[in-house]
Image (spheres, rainbow, N blue to C red):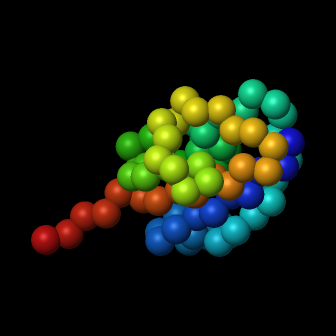
Amino acid sequence: MNITVKLFATFRNGRFKIDNQEWPEGTDCRRIVASLGLTEEEIGIVLINGRHVPLEQQLAQADTLSLFPLVGGG
């Protein structure tokens, strides 16, 4: 299945902004996060098609996965 992956802020460093990727049916967000070399502790927000989802959420054909890092500051 074809998934669009969008990375934001520091996740783009050394990676991409938007990429279309092929994944097998039943792939969840956690698997894609791991393939990008990201840890679950780095993840702030996970969206599929603009809706907040857990990392366990499975993706479907033509979904858009957006990943945002944790934001800190003061």
Total tally of numbered discs in the picture: 0
For the residue pair 66 and 15, the one nearer the viewer reads as: 66
Residue 70 visible within the image: yes
User: Residue 17 occupies which quadrant of the picture?
Assistant: bottom right
Residue 37 visible within the image: no
Screen quadrant of the C terminus: bottom left
Task: Give how far across and how far down residue 16 sits, in percent.
Answer: 67, 69
- Which residue sits at x=49%, y=41%? 53
- Which residue sits at x=57%, y=69%? 12
Task: Give how far across and how far down residue 42 sits, in percent.
Answer: 41, 50
- Which residue sits at x=72%, y=32%? 27
Screen quadrant of the N terminus: top right
Task: Give how far across and how far down residue 72 sits, in percent.
Answer: 25, 64
Q: Is 67 placed left or right of 19 in the picture?
A: left
Q: Is 60 placed left or right of 56 in the picture?
A: right
- Which residue sits at x=35%, y=57%? 70
User: Residue 35 occupies which quadrant of the picture?
Assistant: top right
Residue 72 to residue 33: above or below: below
Q: Is 69 placed left or right of 36 in the picture?
A: left
Task: Give how far across and how far down residue 60 sits, in percent.
Answer: 75, 39
User: Residue 28 occupies which quadrant of the picture?
Assistant: top right
